[in-house]
Amino acid sequence: MLGIEGDFLGADVIGSRHFNAGFNQVSPNIDMMADLRLRARYAITPRVPLFETFGGAWANADLPVTGIGGGSGDADFFGWSAGGAPRLRSILIGARASTISSPILALRK
């Protein structure tokens, strides 16, 4: 069995980091995330199906920079999402992992 599944999330993930020998600070705020995955099911036995999922992931972050030459901007980050699990007697046992990388950055003053 094959299918497609996805998620779209609103978020408020914030952080802060100094750089440029401490003269500048960036305070990113991730406000949107999404992923779209292909999902497959394979029956190991009639009572033990195995589920696998793999696809792309995206996040958008606001990137205000304070200090010398500061400004603001936003960036789109792209990555992957994958997971898998056997289902034993209606109990799902498994894991899912994601990574977001490769920023596409747009700065403005």
Image (cartoon, rainbow, N blue to C red):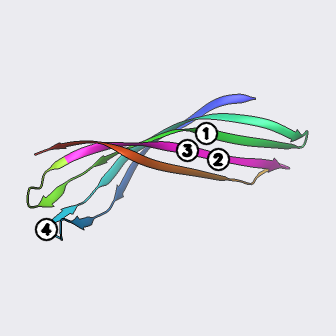
Type of amino acid at the residue the image marks with label 4? Phe
Give residue 4's quadrant in the image: top right
Report the disc number at residue 82. none
Q: CA distance from mark 1 to mark 2?
A: 7 Å
- Give 79 or 89, whichever is nearer the viewer: 79
Mark 2 neighbour class, 10 Å CA radius: few under 14, some 14 to 19, many 20 or more = some
The part of the chain drawn in magenta is 73-89
Which badge, 4 or 3, is on the more N-terminal residue? 4
Q: Which residue is mark 3?
A: 81
Q: CA distance from mark 3 to mark 1?
A: 6 Å
Helix, strand or loop at mark 4:
loop
Return the x and y of residue 90 as percentages of the image width and height: 81, 48
**Circles 4 and 1 in contact, beta carbons < 8 Å:** no
**Number of the front mark, 4 or 3:** 4
Type of amino acid at the residue the image marks with label 1? Phe
Type of amino acid at the residue the image marks with label 2? Gly
